[in-house]
């Protein structure tokens, strides 16, 4: 008897986690491996943030917290959203969750009903379609073009809409492409969403990692109407190097925030108590870490871009945010999974196949690793491209 629910049968495991785990296991066995697959900063969490968690533990902050988060953190997030994003929320509209991943899932579960369609631009972050399926919805994948900088256009969005469309998911800066939407692009997409009251899930987890002239814009800040249709998702993993802490949040119009709070009530109860105190320290402490982190990634980004531009048979759009390159590999004539299998087994380079992001003619290379690893990994990738 197959006792697993049909909902779970439709869901695929995370290929990004599979590749990173494979690379970590190889490294643990002492095997040579150049990890360009990871999705987490290799830099440790800043000391003052760790210290705040230790103080919280020593002070006995070890009990359940309100499901939406401790008041101090919700207020710190209200202040952050006002100062950084031009967004005016009150604390009740914030729900602190166990990571931005859970924030996305809570938002989807709160909005999507059986059979509802959710528009997801591809290449997309691996978990969006699976979360939509888990909620009983139908992911509608809209392939973006390299020539549009891998960004959904308002025209594409409009063309994909049907009477069943309930939500669109935007992720700027994007994983896996590093694309950053401009204010004009967001306004155009927002107009289409407003026309049919489509809820916007705006995943802004890479907000702090933009480079050059690129500027992060929160779509909810563009008008009152868009504010009322948008769930903003963000978290501490990427900006503060806090992936293992599991700390993220949603900021939403009141009715959606209340729905999300109900989900929290009956599932996780609350994000880890002492991690929330660390979150307060992250937001209120010295932000110098962020500019150092961004500067460091920018050096790597430019290094990788120069190297990739010199490799034949591939193409790449310069990413403006996050810490990834999405490399077009269609000219190599090998599907992405096969390509990545060969890359890791023969060349010892871990990369994520584009198929994980709904785009089979590309791979994702991440630069959240040292310049030495990047250098050797890219030399090997270049060799691979020469030999194929
Ligand atoms: C686009 C995007 N959203 C959300 C997440 C989840 O972040 P968190 O670690 O806060 O759950 C990730 C992590 O890789 C991501 O890339």
Image (cartoon, rainbow, N blue to C red):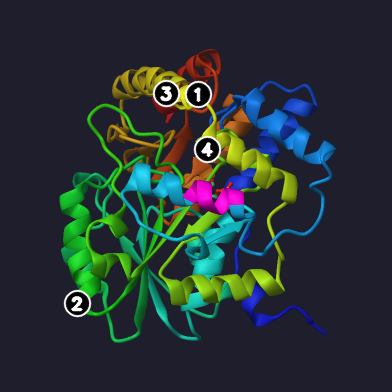
In the displayed structure image, the side of residue 55 where residue 129 appears, left or right: left
According to the image, label 3 marks what residue? 291
User: Which of 160/41 is in front?
Assistant: 41
Task: Return the disc, 3 or 4, that comes first in the chain's sequence.
Answer: 4
According to the image, label 4 marks what residue? 283
Closer to the observer: label 3 or label 4? Answer: 4
User: Which of 225/374 is in front?
Assistant: 225
Query: Which residue shows up at 56% across the image and 67% down it?
Result: 106
Task: Return the disc, 1 or 2, that comes first in the chain's sequence.
Answer: 2
Q: CA distance from mark 3 to mark 4?
A: 14 Å
Expressed as whole percent of the image width and height from the top left, the position of residue 275 reads 69, 44
Q: Are marks 2 and 3 in contact (CB under 8 Å)?
A: no
Task: Return the disc, 1 or 4, that comes first in the chain's sequence.
Answer: 4
Query: Which residue shows up at 55% across the image and 53% down it?
Result: 74
Q: CA distance from mark 2 to mark 3?
A: 38 Å
Q: How many marks?
A: 4
Expressed as whole percent of the image width and height from the top left, the position of residue 265 reads 68, 72
The stretch in magenta equals: 72-77
- For label 2, the SS is helix
Q: CA distance from mark 1 to mark 4?
A: 11 Å
- For label 1, the SS is helix
Closer to the observer: label 1 or label 4? Answer: 4
In the rendered image, residue 75 lying in the magenta stretch gets the answer yes
According to the image, label 2 marks what residue? 195
Expressed as whole percent of the image width and height from the top left, the position of residue 190 reads 22, 64
- For label 3, the SS is helix
Q: CA distance from mark 2 to mark 4?
A: 36 Å
- For label 4, the SS is helix
According to the image, label 1 marks what residue? 289
């Amino acid at each position: 008897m197959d006792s697993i629910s049909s909902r779970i049968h439709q869901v695929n495991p995370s290929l990004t986690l599979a590749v990173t785990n494979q690379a970590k296991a190889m490294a643990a066995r002492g095997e040579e491996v150049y990890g360009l697959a990871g999705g987490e900063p290799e830099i440790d969490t800043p000391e003052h943030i760790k210290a705040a968690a230790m103080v919280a533990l020593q002070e006995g902050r070890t009990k359940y917290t309100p499901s939406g988060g401790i008041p101090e953190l919700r207020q710190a997030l209200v202040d952050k959203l006002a100062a950084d994003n031009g967004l005016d929320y009150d604390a009740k509209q914030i729900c602190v969750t166990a990571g931005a991943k859970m924030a996305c899932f809570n938002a989807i579960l709160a909005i999507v009903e059986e059979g509802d369609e959710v528009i997801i631009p591809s290449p997309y972050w691996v978990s969006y379609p699976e979360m939509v399926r888990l909620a009983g919805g139908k992911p509608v994948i809209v392939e973006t073009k390299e020539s549009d900088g891998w960004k959904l256009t308002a025209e594409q969005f409009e063309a994909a809409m049907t009477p069943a469309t309930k939500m669109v998911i935007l992720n700027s800066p994007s994983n896996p492409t590093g694309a950053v939407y401009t204010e004009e692009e967001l306004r155009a997409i927002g107009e289409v969403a407003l026309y049919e009251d489509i809820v916007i899930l705006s995943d802004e987890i890479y907000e702090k990692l933009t480079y050059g002239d690129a500027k992060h814009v929160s779509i909810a800040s563009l008008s009152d109407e868009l504010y009322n249709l948008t769930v903003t998702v963000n978290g501490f993993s990427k900006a503060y190097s806090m992936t293992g802490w599991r700390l993220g949040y949603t900021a939403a119009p009141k009715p959606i925030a209340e729905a999300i709070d109900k989900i929290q009530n009956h599932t996780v109860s609350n994000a880890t108590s002492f991690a929330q105190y660390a979150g307060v320290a992250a937001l209120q402490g010295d932000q110098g870490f962020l500019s150092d982190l961004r500067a460091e990634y920018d050096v790597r980004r430019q290094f990788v871009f120069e190297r990739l531009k010199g490799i034949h048979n591939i193409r790449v759009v310069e990413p403006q945010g996050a810490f990834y390159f999405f490399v077009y590999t269609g000219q190599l004539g090998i599907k992405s999974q096969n390509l990545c299998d060969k890359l890791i087994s023969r060349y010892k380079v871990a990369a994520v196949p584009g198929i994980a992001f709904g785009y089979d003619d590309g791979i994702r290379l991440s630069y959240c690793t040292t310049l030495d690893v990047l250098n050797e990994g890219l030399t090997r990738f270049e060799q691979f491209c020469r030999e194929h």
